[in-house]
């Protein structure tokens, strides 16, 4: 019985990343890069996933390029803590990919006009 339950849980864990939900970037605000800073916020997005709206997804420019952070708050005791915690690494990566792609599209539009 234990082996059966373990196998079912393993199957659930493997399958959950195969079908990712649709991720819609509802809005994106762009900001200029701050050249003197090692990391600067260059965009803030609002994302819809599974019927939930996540506001405050930041796009940052670091020394190694662009990266994305989900909303965070600062605690004196623990430092920065996530407000939204994805259920898997793959869903976090999918949100980041969608936001970074939209950032690049918006940035290209801005340069063309």
Image (cartoon, rainbow, N blue to C red):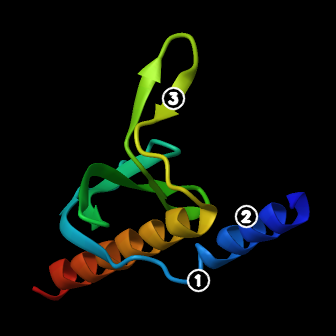
Question: Which disc is residue 48 wearing?
Answer: none
Look at the numbered disc 3 and give the secondary structure of its residue. Answer: strand
Task: Give left or right: position of 1 versus 24.
Answer: right
Q: Nearer the viewer, mark 1 or mark 2?
A: 2
Which residue is under mark 1?
18
Which residue is under mark 2?
9
Camera-nearest residue between 39 and 94 = 94
Question: Which disc is residue 80 wearing?
Answer: 3
Relative to 108, is 103 above or below? above
Q: Nearer the viewer, mark 3 or mark 2?
A: 2
Residue drawn at (78%, 62%), measured in percent from left and top?
Answer: 5
Task: Give left or right: position of 34 versus 29.
Answer: right
* Residue 34 placement (x, y as % from top left): 36, 48
Q: In which image quadrant can residue 60 be found?
A: bottom left
* Residue 44 placement (x, y as % from top left): 27, 54
For marks 1 and 3, give the CA distance.
30 Å
Relative to 111, is 91 above or below? above
Residue drawn at (25%, 58%), measured in percent from left and top?
Answer: 52
For marks 3 and 2, give the CA distance.
32 Å
């Amino acid at each position: 019985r234990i082996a059966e339950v373990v196998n079912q849980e393993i199957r659930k864990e493997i399958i959950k990343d195969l079908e990712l939900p649709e991720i819609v970037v509802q809005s994106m605000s762009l900001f200029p890069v701050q050249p003197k800073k090692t990391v600067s916020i260059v965009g803030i997005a609002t994302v819809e996933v599974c019927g939930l709206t996540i506001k405050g997804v930041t796009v940052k420019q670091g020394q190694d390029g662009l990266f994305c952070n989900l909303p965070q708050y600062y605690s004196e005791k623990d430092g920065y803590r996530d407000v939204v915690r994805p259920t898997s690494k793959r869903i976090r990566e999918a949100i980041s990919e969608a936001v970074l792609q939209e950032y690049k599209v918006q940035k290209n539009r801005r340069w063309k006009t």
